[in-house]
Structure formats: structure tokens, C-alpha cells
Image: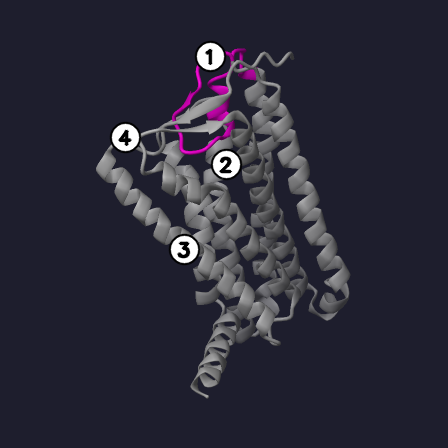
């Protein structure tokens, strides 16, 4: 397909045309972004500073928190600025960079959720072999696999979109560059292109979601032999993981498992997994995890003791 591209920039219409609502949303998104950065960095600092949080689960949790900060930083700062304007422009190169970054960091987060589910499966279903199976080398390989898999996925998306010719309309009724809004501007029939997007994004999201749900069902079924205290602890950990999975994957499946089309609710769904989910992850993992809460409390008391000297 020859890339006859006459478009050098795109116009993003943002979330709404109401100026009062735009200003209010900008303030709300700023608060949410600051909460996302501080909350996730607090988890990273807590895990690094606490000797009690040295298990593979917290290694993956630290990586996920860093990905949440980076993923949110790709979208939210621009969203805050865009919310102050009725419309804004983004260059063609900037749009492609945002698209790649969005799918790369989002992809790393998705694969990390698989690694965390596998870690919980081994810890609960094969506790005697846990330290052998989840060795530091295996954890690093899983993290490297997440980066490699996300890089492959994002590169495919970028090459795919780069081949689409844009020869006229350049107005995107969205707050960010994404696949379906861009496909609506293409100068060619997008039926086949839409199927490719569904295969590369929609089917991937749905498949991983089903794998994760199945893995947690297996984990929950294996809890029958545990004591009530062990079951409570495992349910608390798995419950927090499942909450994160649902928050991210349900909007993702809704957006990418369908023919090429855009709907008004798409913006809210995109806000859900680009802004809301990264902000809620620290709350979910800390409020439902006594070990993290105790480590944060000790870290706080240690800092207060040092500050009082």
C-alpha cells in the first residue's frame, strides 16, 4: 500500500466543547495525575526500602507501578493541557509517537499482569517449589519478555498505521491518537484494516483476559486445602489482582473488539484505562495488602524518627 500522506498534523477535539466543563476536567485530571505519580512512586520506594517485601510478587508490583507512572505520563499531561483548549493540534510524528508509547507501556503492563498471575499460581498451588520456580533469573526473564512482547505489539501497530494514507480530513474527535479514530480518517476502505486491529489488539486483550480469569479460577479452586487464615490472605491478594485486571481489560476489550467505529462513550472508556486505572492501582494493592500497609507504616515511622532527631 503506497503511503500518499498529505496530512502533517491532526486536530484533537478533546473530551467536550463546554469551556466550563473543560476547565473542571483539567483540574480533576491534574489531581488524578499527581495522585497516580505519588501513589505508584510510594509503592516503589516502599518495596525498595523494606526488607520484608523481597518476594517476586513485589518485584512485579514495582515494575507495574513504574509502568503505570510512565503510561499515565504519556497521556495525562497532554490531556490536562488539551482540556484547557477547545481543540489542539498534534504533529503527524507526535501522533505516531503517542500511539507507539501508549501501546508499548500498556502492553508491558498487560504482560506483567500475566506474570503476577503466574507468580500467585505458583505460590498458592506449588508452594514447596516456589523459590525454585520463581528464581530471580526467571523473574528477570519474565520482565524482559514483557518488554519484548510489548515492543513487538507496539511496533506492529505503528507500522500498520504508518502505511495508512491520510489525504484530507485531519480532525480527530478524541483526546489522543488511537487506532479507530485514525482509521476513520483513512483514504481507503478500512474493513480489512479494522480486522487487523481486532486481531492485534482486540483478540490479544480478550485472550489474555480469559487466561487471567482462568488462572485465578484455578487458584481459587486450590484454596480448599488451606487454613482459613491462608485462604483469607490468598483471597485478599488475588482479589486485588482481579480488580486491576477487570479495570483495565473491560474497557480495552470494548474499544478494540468491534468493527471500525467510534462512539461518544469511547472517550470515557479511554479515560478509564489511561487515567483512572493507573491511579487506582496503588490504592487497590495497598488497601487490600496488609504486608504493604505494614511496610509503609514502618517506613513512615522510621522517617518521623529520623526527622525528630
Q: Which residue lies furthest to the left in this view?
A: 20
Q: Are marks 2 and 4 in contact (CB under 8 Å)?
A: no
Tell me the tag on residue 253: 2
Q: In this view, does 114 lie above or below 52?
A: above
Crowding near the residue tagged with mark 3, few <14, some 14–19, many ≥20 C-alpha atoms within 10 Å: few
Mark 3 and mark 2: Cα distance apart in space: 27 Å
Q: Nearer the viewer, mark 2 or mark 4?
A: 4
Query: In the rendering, which numbered label is found on residue 34?
Result: 3
Query: Quick one: SS at disc 4?
Result: loop
* First reached walking from the N terminus: tag 3 or tag 1: 3
Alpha-carbon span between mark 3 and mark 1:
38 Å
Neighbour tally class for label 4: few under 14, some 14-19, many 20 plus, Cα within 10 Å: few
Residue 300 spot, x, y in % from top left:
46, 77
Asked if marks 3 and 1 touch (Cβ < 8 Å), the reply is no
Given this view, does label 2 or label 1 mark the residue nearer the observer? Answer: 1
User: Residues under labels 1 and 4: Cα distance?
Assistant: 23 Å
- Magenta region's main secondary structure? loop
Residue carrying label 1: 168
Q: Which residue is at the far bottom?
A: 309
Marks 2/1: CA–CA distance? 30 Å
Q: Which of 195 and 24 is in front in this view?
A: 24
The residue pinned by badge 4 equals 17
- Residue 259 visible to the viewer: no
The magenta segment is 167-191
Pointers 4 and 3 in contact (CB under 8 A)? no
- Position of residue 219 measured from the top left corner of the image (x, y, whole percent): 60, 59
Amino acid at each position: 500500500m503506497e503511503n500518499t500522506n498529505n496530512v502533517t498534523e491532526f486536530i484533537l477535539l478533546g473530551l467536550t466543547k463546554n469551556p466550563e466543563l473543560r476547565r473542571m476536567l483539567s483540574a480533576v485530571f491534574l489531581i488524578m495525575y499527581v495522585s497516580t505519580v505519588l501513589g505508584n512512586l510510594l509503592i516503589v520506594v516502599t518495596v525498595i526500602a523494606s526488607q520484608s517485601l523481597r518476594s517476586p510478587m513485589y518485584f512485579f508490583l514495582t515494575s507495574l507501578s513504574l509502568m503505570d507512572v510512565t503510561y499515565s505520563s504519556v497521556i495525562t499531561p497532554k490531556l490536562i493541557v488539551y482540556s484547557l483548549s477547545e481543540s489542539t493540534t498534534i504533529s503527524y510524528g507526535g501522533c505516531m509517537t503517542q500511539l507507539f508509547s501508549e501501546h508499548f507501556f500498556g502492553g508491558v503492563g498487560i504482560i506483567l499482569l500475566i506474570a503476577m498471575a503466574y507468580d500467585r499460581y505458583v505460590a498458592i498451588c506449588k508452594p514447596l517449589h516456589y523459590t525454585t520456580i520463581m528464581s530471580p533469573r526467571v523473574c528477570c526473564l519474565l520482565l524482559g519478555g514483557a518488554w519484548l512482547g510489548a515492543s513487538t505489539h507496539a511496533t506492529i501497530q505503528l507500522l500498520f498505521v504508518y502505511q495508512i494514507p491520510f489525504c484530507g480530513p485531519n480532525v480527530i474527535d478524541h483526546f489522543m491518537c488511537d487506532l479507530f479514530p485514525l482509521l476513520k480518517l483513512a483514504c481507503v476502505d478500512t474493513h480489512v484494516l479494522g480486522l487487523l486491529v481486532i486481531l492485534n489488539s482486540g483478540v490479544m486483550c480478550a485472550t489474555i483476559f480469559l487466561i487471567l480469569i482462568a488462572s485465578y479460577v484455578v487458584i481459587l479452586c486450590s484454596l480448599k486445602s488451606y487454613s482459613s487464615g491462608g485462604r483469607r490472605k490468598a483471597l485478599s491478594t488475588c482479589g486485588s489482582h482481579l480488580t486491576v485486571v477487570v479495570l483495565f481489560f473491560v474497557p480495552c476489550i470494548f474499544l478494540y473488539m468491534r468493527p471500525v467505529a467510534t462512539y461518544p462513550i469511547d472517550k470515557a472508556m479511554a479515560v478509564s484505562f489511561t487515567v483512572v486505572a493507573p491511579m487506582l492501582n496503588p490504592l487497590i494493592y495497598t488497601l487490600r495488602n496488609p504486608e504493604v500497609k505494614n511496610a509503609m507504616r514502618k517506613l513512615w515511622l522510621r522517617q518521623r524518627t529520623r526527622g525528630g532527631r
